[in-house]
Amino acid sequence: MCVSLVALFFFSCSNYFKNDYNDNSPTSGKLKVYIDEGLKNHIKNQVYTFESIYPNANIYLYSSSENDAIQKLYNDSCELIVISRVLNKNETKSFASKNYTIIPTPIAKNGIAVIASKKTQINTLRFEDVVAILNGKNNLFDSLGKPLSLTVVFDSPNSSVIHYLQDSVLKKLKFGSNCTALKSTQESINYVASHKNSIGFIDFAWLSDSDDSIFKANETVLKVLPLSKKNSSYFEKPNQSSFKLNTYPFTRTIYAIKKTGEFTLAKGFETFMAGPKGQLTFLKQGLLPNKQNERPVKIVIEP
């Protein structure tokens, strides 16, 4: 009778834990995370490390546009998203209407890279050149002095790269007829690698890790163009140093954004990415972590 009562009590109580998406802890349960497509490889490694440390946690990643990720968070389709911007005023107001307090957590610095075939006769681009190219009015010339007509490709329609270029670079100007959005970042990389006089605007995170197979497969055919900031003649490539010094014109911050709820797996994974192990993972993969651990240095001066 005692055994039966214990079993009945156990199974009646265990009903509370049937939905691991809702009933979880910072280190266990199930979690759906929608991420900007350009950040897929980096966040995938964050998940791998987190699940290796906490085997009772199961995190499922879904690549999407940043707007779609925000909509999924708003519609309760997930509890955490990772994108390259904060919510705008209208989005914040919409979440507030549902009594959601949204506090974005910065986790790393990233950027938009401009890539070209190594056969393309461009080695640097001024900010003003980028604006002209995107607007379809570039005045670049090849080594023989002939006008250089460039085809521009983006990673995907409605991507965060397109939104950034439209809002922060072109502003009130429109994309030229020379600009085309493909289906994915990988397709954009393949197109630029095989088409002379084409350039691509992609998330730098795709090429930031020199040990990654994508970087190694393209390092002999692609080049990342150094860019200057507006009204400057100083050119920089996207990298940890230029992100830190803010000398690269298209630098962006990556944010983990969750809804309210502190004792949840969403909070646990967010904290992990912003903590020492997560930050070290970003560092090793070529992005600039939001926080870097101090390294004490002892200098001994002897006569």
Image (cartoon, rainbow, N blue to C red):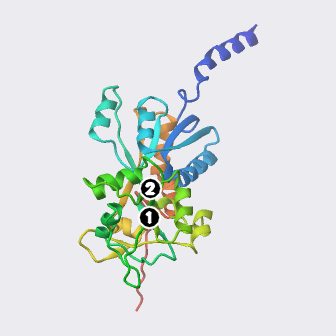
Q: Tell me the CA gap for discs 2 and 1.
A: 8 Å
Q: Nearer the viewer, residue 84 or 289?
A: 84
For residue 167, above or below residue 215: above
The quarter of the picture where residue 8 lies is top right
- Is residue 262 among the parts visible in the rendering? no
Q: Can you give x and y, in whole percent of width and height, for residue 20 in the image?
A: 58, 28
For residue 247, above or below residue 100: below
For residue 100, above or below residue 115: above
**Residue 161 falls left or right of residue 280:** left
Q: Say which amino acid is labelled 2.
A: Thr
**Residue 1 falls left or right of residue 234:** right
Q: Which residue matches tag 1?
A: 151
The quarter of the picture where residue 297 lies is bottom left
> Answer yes or no: do the residues labelled 2 and 1 have beta carbons within 8 Å?
yes
Q: Say which amino acid is labelled 1.
A: Thr
Q: Nearer the viewer, residue 15 or 164?
A: 164
Q: Quadrant of the N terminus?
A: top right
Q: Which residue matches tag 2?
A: 180
Q: Can you give x and y, in whole percent of width and height, for residue 165 in the image?
A: 34, 56
| Structural crowding at the residue carrying mark 1, measured as other residues with C-alpha within 10 Å and reported as few (<14), some (14–19) or many (≥20) | many
Q: Can you give x and y, in whole percent of width and height, for residue 80 in the image?
A: 46, 38
Q: Residue at x 41, y 71 (%)?
A: 237
Q: Residue at x 58, y 40 (%)?
A: 59
- Is residue 128 among the parts visible in the rendering? yes
Q: Residue at x 35, y 67 (%)?
A: 248
**Residue 98 falls left or right of residue 8:** left
Q: Nearer the viewer, residue 122 or 142?
A: 142
Q: Quadrant of the C terminus?
A: bottom left
Q: Nearer the viewer, residue 286 or 113?
A: 113
Return the residue found at the far front.
Answer: 146
Q: Can you give x and y, in whole percent of width and height, for residue 76 in the image?
A: 46, 29
Return the residue found at the far bottom.
Answer: 303
